[in-house]
């Protein structure tokens, strides 16, 4: 049986910062899916340390750069390590989590590293929270690489035992629900439906590169034709996998709108006296045909019971689609003449940006002003 792939993490640091770096190394070592690299642990007697360090940086999946007032001003090999890591970062696809800067004290972040969001690892009492942020980013990187992190445990060395349960999903983070409402009638069979599958997976992959999005965004997929069904229950984006879609049936939009509303009302947690509930749901709807049922009844139900929905963005496909129907449901309508993989990618790439933005400051409205765009 092949050995489980692991995330290779290089710890770039100054020798004066060894105590805290050892702590980070020990914490990472408790995770079976992480292979951390620390010079004093990995370089064997008789090996050339410069060669081994350069080789470790080059083969790393993530480089954690631990910055301090000492390391940012110190001349020597740490500066060479940072420059080498920066050169490798230029070869990575845009959005890849590769360099994670971590401040150990009130030092200035070097200019070339400022482009990446850094984590403050001080004062000491905030170290556990800082480590959790680092851990989230590592898990995002591992997931995008196909590394199995299902056995993850957010470990606190010397303060917990293996028997202590750890809740990875923080109860303090308000969920931001994102629903995809996808028409899957018989005429969507073939390339159109495959393009939709690819598009939904694309936006999921885009959002996985945003640590803030990973902490809050939950995704659900609802399909509809003759009947509507929730084929992906609302769940954290970190565990999302787009299933294969099946085409068939007619286009009962009214039934789908009612079903969507009921799902949202069932899924979303409301605020209590001691805890804020989920954010309102964001809905992205793809339709390619005129509805075959009494869609206005479904819209009336949505208007009366859809208080937990923040807004709907519709992608209407085809020359024969009655655009007045989507316009009655939402002011946010995009029009295309045909579904192709390229157009679907463009659509989902476009909507991923406001979702990322909305995941950052709490309460930010996802939707732009009413618009109608032809792609």
Image (cartoon, helix red, strand yellow):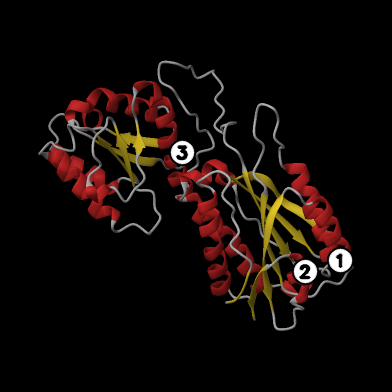
User: Left of 27 or right of it: where is 295?
Assistant: right
Of mark 3 and mark 2, the one earlier in the sequence is 3
Q: Quadrant of the C terminus?
A: bottom right
Q: Which mark is residue 296?
A: 1
Q: Position of residue 86 (x, y in %)?
A: 24, 51
Q: Which mark is residue 328?
A: 2
Q: Can residue 3 be seen here?
A: no
Secondary structure under the numbered disc 2 in the rendered image: helix
Q: Can residue 331 be seen here?
A: yes
Is the residue marked by circle 2 packed among few (<14), some (14-19), or many (20+) residues within 10 Å?
few
Gap in angstroms between the C-alphas marked 1 and 3: 44 Å
> Disc 3 or disc 2, which is closer to the eye?
2
Where is 341 relative to 103, above or below?
below
Where is 170 relative to 146, above or below?
above
Gap in angstroms between the C-alphas marked 1 and 2: 9 Å
Q: Which mark is residue 311?
A: none
């Amino acid at each position: 049986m092949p050995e489980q792939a692991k995330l290779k993490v290089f710890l770039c640091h100054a020798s004066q910062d060894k105590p805290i770096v050892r702590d980070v190394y020990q914490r990472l070592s408790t995770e079976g899916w992480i292979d951390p690299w620390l010079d004093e642990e990995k370089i064997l007697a008789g090996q050339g340390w410069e060669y081994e360090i350069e080789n470790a940086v080059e083969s790393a999946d993530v480089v954690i750069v631990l910055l301090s007032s000492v390391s940012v001003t110190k001349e020597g090999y740490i500066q060479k390590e940072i420059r080498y890591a920066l050169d490798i970062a230029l070869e990575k696809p845009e959005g890849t989590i590769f360099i994670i800067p971590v401040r150990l004290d009130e030092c200035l972040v070097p200019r070339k590293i400022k482009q990446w969001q850094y984590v403050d690892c001080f004062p000491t009492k905030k170290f556990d929270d800082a480590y959790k942020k680092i851990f989230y980013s590592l898990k995002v990187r591992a997931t995008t690489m196909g590394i199995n992190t299902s056995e993850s445990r957010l470990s606190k060395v010397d303060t917990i035992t293996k028997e202590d349960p750890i809740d990875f999903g923080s109860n303090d983070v308000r969920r931001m629900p994102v629903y995809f409402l996808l028409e899957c009638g018989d005429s969507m069979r073939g390339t159109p439906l495959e393009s939709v599958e690819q598009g939904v997976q694309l936006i999921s992959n885009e959002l996985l590169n945003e640590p803030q999005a990973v902490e809050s965004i939950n995704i659900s997929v609802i399909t509809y034709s003759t009947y509507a069904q929730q084929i992906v229950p609302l769940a954290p984006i970190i565990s999302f996998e787009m299933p294969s879609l099946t085409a068939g049936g007619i286009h009962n939009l009214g039934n789908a709108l009612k079903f969507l509303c009921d799902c949202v009302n069932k899924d979303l947690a409301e605020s209590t006296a001691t805890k804020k509930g989920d954010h309102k749901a964001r809905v992205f709807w793809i339709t390619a045909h005129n509805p075959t049922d009494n869609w206005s009844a479904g819209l009336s139900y949505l208007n009366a019971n859809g208080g937990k929905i923040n807004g709907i963005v519709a992608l209407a496909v085809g020359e024969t689609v009655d655009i007045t129907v989507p316009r009655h449901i939402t002011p946010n309508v995009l029009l295309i003449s045909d579904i192709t993989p390229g157009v679907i990618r463009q659509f989902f790439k476009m909507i991923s940006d406001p979702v990322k933005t909305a995941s950052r400051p709490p309460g930010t409205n996802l939707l732009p002003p009413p618009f109608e765009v032809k792609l």
